[in-house]
Image (spheres, rainbow, N blue to C red):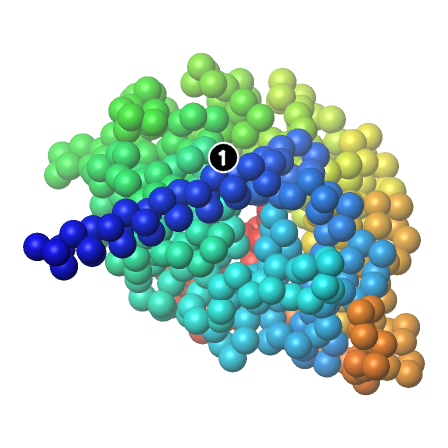
Amino acid sequence: MQMQRFISLILLFATLLCTHAHAQINDDFQQIFGSKYVGDGAYLKKAEWDDHFYPININNKWGYINQRGEITIFPQFDWADVQYAGIMRIVVGGRTGFITYNSGSGQIEWLVQPIYAWADHFAEGVAIISDGNKYGFINRIGIQTVPLELDGALRYREGLAAFQKGNLIGYMNRVGKVMIPAKFDLAHSFSENVAVARTSTRSSKTLGYIDRKGEFVYTVKNNQFDTLSSFSDGLAAIEKNGLWGFINRKYELVTEPQFEQVRPYFSDFAAVRKNGKWGYINKEGKTVIEPQYDEAYDFQEVLAMIKVNNKYGFINREGENIIPPQFADALPYYFDTARISQFPNFGYIDIEGSIIWDPRSPHDGIYNLNDNKKRMKAPTKRSQASIPYKQDHIYQDKLPKERDNSKSRSRSRRNRRR
């Protein structure tokens, strides 16, 4: 009896400690929306608005620079992801962990040691983890809020995360409590208080949007649509017979299915593909930038990335080439900084196109900002960087996961969009 009481006291103390830590995290961090989009309601310290870090690669070792192009974390990892909410996902020896940067000491601090076969970046203070087979969740101090026992999981959005057990999908809150039982055979993350979901029986299927209670608030009637997507900026893409259009929050069709591909609305514009070329439409479905690009991406920030004749550049909302297509590879702007490449290595430019980081420029080696004695040889040419995860672990915002049995480990630009 005394032993049981002792164990109960320990469990109570641990629960209070975790609750206190979670409260501290919420007090110290603010949720970011708008032009400084960090994805999925991530948290960002106020002090980090002007001190964001970006991954670099020098001779196949990864580190970080700040927005001034100074090396803040010396290249030492096998791979490093972009910084989300002050936390950086890194790979060492094929295992994934998380670090943060102590600006006072100029040193990295391990939040989670590299022990996982795969881990996603943090969203709403929680990250998906995997042992290569099962999935779970950890919080910002590395405690498993959900053990590695799920067959699939999505990032937290609006306080809920979809999880898969067997062939069925439900939703849980941030502490792992099931809020919507697993009863769907297809589900997306919540967005604007609804989520795409589907139930199936031997005789019928019901596809629509559910509320936070798991009840359908809209269902597709008479096979009007074949595919639904999540809402963004008050509109959601729908597909019928291979063509895409948009519906509003009243589930009314506002843009007839006519596009071969579409991207979600951001800042009132959506990128759409018609007759093999990409352009942009507004919320009324009117063309604002004529289809003319081989690829086009979202206006998540001031400029949008486009591709013409195998070269990437950036345009403004009037369709003007602010940074003309010239790069062999690029990623969209993130906190006013874009990754670009004209060579096997990659660098960074600011919103005006000025170079922040060019790994070709040093000829006598590269020094650490915080320790000038620490030095690396100048960069040598190398193959293009890629995510060190097999395609099965590239994040997709729906369950069940689409399996890719190929051995390709190439990067998917769309799946890396923030």
Q: Extreme left residue here?
A: 1
**Which part of the image, by quadrant, shows the N terminus?**
bottom left
Residue at the location (61% across, 59% down)? 100
Identify whether 181 is placed above or below 249. Answer: below
Q: Position of residue 54 (x, y in %)?
A: 71, 59
Residue 163 is at least partly visible in this image = no
Q: Position of residue 13 (x, y in %)?
A: 32, 49
Identify whether 187 is placed above or below 354. Answer: above
Identify residue for label 1. 243
Q: Position of residue 68 (x, y in %)?
A: 85, 56
Q: Quadrant of residue 219?
A: top left
Name the residue nearer the viewer: 86 or 58: 86
Residue at the location (64% across, 39% down)? 37
Identify whether 412 is placed above or below 37. Answer: below
Name the residue nearer the viewer: 212 or 290: 212
Q: Amino acid at mark 1?
A: Leu
Residue at the location (37% across, 33% down)? 196
Q: Is residue 28 left or right of residue 229?
A: right
Task: Count the marks.
Answer: 1
Mark 1, residues whose alpha carbon is within 10 Å: few (<14), some, or many (≥20)?
some
